[in-house]
Image (spheres, rainbow, N blue to C red):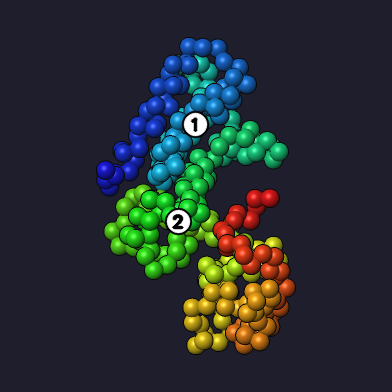
Amino acid sequence: MIGRNKNEVFRFIKERIWKKLQSWSHKSLSKAGKETLIKAVLQALPSYAMSVFMIPNRTIDEIEKLLNAFWWGANSNKHKGIKWMRWERLAISKLEGGLGFKNLSSFNLAMLGKQAWRLLSNPNSLISRIYQAKYYPESSFLNTSLGHNPSYTWKSLWSTQHLLKNGIRWRLGNGNTIPVWGEPWVKYNDNYHCIHPHDPSNSQAFKVSDLMSNDKNGWNDVLINSLLDKDTSNRILNIPILNPRCEDKHIWKWNP
């Protein structure tokens, strides 16, 4: 059970890292050795918890302070050493001048986002059906609200909704499952955005397949021009319909 004091619940992560550090304190470690241990062992310890729960910021700050002290400090409890640089600077990629350590808050969001992606990409899985029945029976994960009295797991997954909206889009197939409104399927420059009807009073629940011609090999330009502004209509008419027998699919736009 996750109670009100989230920091106390997740204190075990900090304690496990602390015990690891104590077991290494007597060893003479080079900077390369410390870097390897931090990346391969210490930052891997909270991975499982971070893939299920949003770890409180206070807990993450305490963990990063431990890692920073271990990086700069001597291998002795008496001499802690001077912390010459903040952890935020060390957690920048090596290409940008940092050391490539994980930013644990971003890593936490990424792990939760991966689980939320599974809700979208595997809608028939047991966990997807449970969450849909409880939290968004009439909509999708991308459009649902947090809801009343949510579990902490759902609250953690829901917090990644904005990340998925920024990186997800539809791959057009037959258009039978893509709603015309409120879903990212039309490209604007380098991003995919949700579109809205030119006339809000005519915003009935169209699927993209309804905008296609009868043979599904082209677009119904008359209907599209009546529903949407000229710029959006031209963007849709320029989308090629490559395989109308293929199912629509959510894809990550940065995945080649």
Q: Please, what is the three-letter code of the amino acid marked with disc 2?
A: Pro
Q: Position of residue 32 (x, y in %)?
A: 63, 21
Q: Please, what is the three-letter code of the amino acid marked with disc 1?
A: Ala
Secondary element at image label 1: helix
Left or right relative to 163: residue 212:
right
Give the image quarter of residue 147.
bottom left
The residue drawn where x is 57% and y is 15% is 29
User: How many numbered circles does the render carry?
Assistant: 2
Query: In terms of depth relative to the viewer, which is nearer, 148 or 177?
Result: 177
The residue drawn where x is 62% and y is 65% is 245
Q: Which residue is mark 2?
A: 123
**Viewer can see residue 160:** no
- Callout 2: 10 Å neighbours few (<14), some, many (20+)? some
Q: Position of residue 171 (x, y in %)?
A: 62, 61
Query: In terms of depth relative to the viewer, which is nearer, 29 or 128?
Result: 128
**Viewer can see residue 202:** yes
Which of pointers 1 and 2 lies earlier in the amino acid sequence? 1
Q: Which label was assigned to residue 44?
A: 1
Q: Which quadrant of the figure contains the N terminus?
A: top left
Left or right relative to 60: residue 164:
right
Q: Is residue 70 above or below residue 9?
A: above
Query: In terms of depth relative to the viewer, which is nearer, 128 or 1?
Result: 128
